[in-house]
Amino acid sequence: MRGTLAAREARLAYLMLTPTFAIVFAIVLFPVLANFWIAFKPVELGDLRPPEPIVRERLRSDATAVGAEVVVRYQMRSSSQDVAIRDVVLFDTLPEGLTLTTDEPRCEVDGTDLACVFGTWDAGYRENLDLTFEAGPAYLAAGAPDPLASRPQMRGRAPNVLTDFTFTLDNFRRVIGAPDFWPSLRITLWYTVFGTIGSILLGLFAAQLLHADFLGKGFLRGVFLFPYVAPVIAAAFAWAFLLDPLSGNVNAVLKEYGLVEQAVNFLSRRTATIDLFGLELAVPMALTVVILFEAWRYFPFAFLFILARFQAIPQDMYEAADVDGASPLQRFWYVTLPQLVGILSTLFLLRFIWTFNKFDDIFLLTGGAAGTKTLTVQVYDQAFALADLGAGAAVAVVLFVILATFMVLYFRFAPEGE
């Protein structure tokens, strides 16, 4: 009896969770599965619309007397230049009183219904079909209605590359074999790692600064959240304006203090040479700027979590450290930092995943130019700039595999309990 009741409760629980499963599948799993499906198919942007026959009609002559001819031209073509269309049929509704006189074996009229069967159209098929009708008394009695009043319809069947079961690895071969793939992957890793570390370090510094009690602390906490809550397009355009080589404030200040002789185009210059103690170093200029933007924009997220963890650290630990004569640096290293390891690890995981998938920041600042083309920008370029959805989906799958590998290694080697 107990086992039967438990089974019924389990079935009821699954039944109640069915809507949740359906929503998760529709919103989360289905797009992921669809991306994997497209990645293994030769799909271009034009393939989103399946091949279909297209028709337009024109009236070449109209009748003003009984027995006169009405000539209608059907301009037909295939929408595809690569795929044949089978079982093509034309349907149209004619005004009453018209009789087909053209000897066209493919067409027949039943009352006022016209049907033409064309069979299979080859790729790129075009045809102009002129049909002649004889006007009868009923046609003129009705006031010679417009034969074009009813729009013709065409039907046909064609294989759809999105739904067939033809799969290929060509997308991955072309994407991975492209000369810009590995540089884009390297740039993505640099951008992700340094952007993530930068945002966490800034968040840690801000949390340490605002953890102390002083007048105006609440106001400053609100100000520190501004980069995160501001619209990304507004933040990106503000940075682009400040760094503009002609009217930007940054270049104006640098030239005012004699730090540069000419304006620096921070967002369009790939590299800059810096003389450090007689050693010339080539610094990726535009990439460094977008990394700084990433760290500045998302440090409030880390700031909130770290500040909350700061407030949960028992004050007894700091009092004990003071009794032992610990310096501020020792207090931070031996008391504060061990208490933050868990939240810092979680923040690094989340920010790494989100930054690795970040697209809008780089696209708004540089468009992927000047050595800032990450894999996410490459997804956009392949799918929409080059109209190759299959290649874009393949790059997205590569992103997924890299992130999945990172997560497996992270959870495998993360400290126990963190």
Image (tube, rainbow, N blue to C red):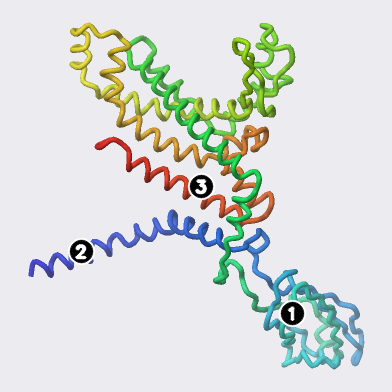
Disc 1 secondary structure class: strand
Query: Marks 1/2: CA distance?
Result: 56 Å
Which of discs 3 and 1 lies nearer the camera? The answer is 3
Crowding at label 2, few (<14), some or many (≥20) Cα neighbours within 10 Å?
few
Q: Name the residue under label 1.
A: 121
Kind of residue indicated by mark 1: Trp
| Residue 268, horizontal then vertical, whole percent | 69, 29
Task: State which tag comes first along the sequence, 2 or 3.
Answer: 2
Q: Which residue lies furthest to the left in this view?
A: 1
Residue in the foreground of this view, choosing between 157 and 216: 157
Quarter of the image for the C terminus: give it: top left
- Based on the displayed image, in which of its 4 quarters is residue 124 positioned? bottom right
Q: Is residue 104 left or right of residue 195?
A: right
Q: Residue 399 carries which label?
A: 3
Q: Are marks 2 and 3 in contact (CB under 8 Å)?
A: no
| Residue 84, horizontal then vertical, whole percent | 71, 76
Residue in the foreground of this view, choosing between 247 and 406: 406
Kind of residue indicated by mark 3: Leu
Disc 2 secondary structure class: helix
| Residue 234, horizontal then vertical, whole percent | 59, 30
Q: Mark 2 points at which residue?
A: 10
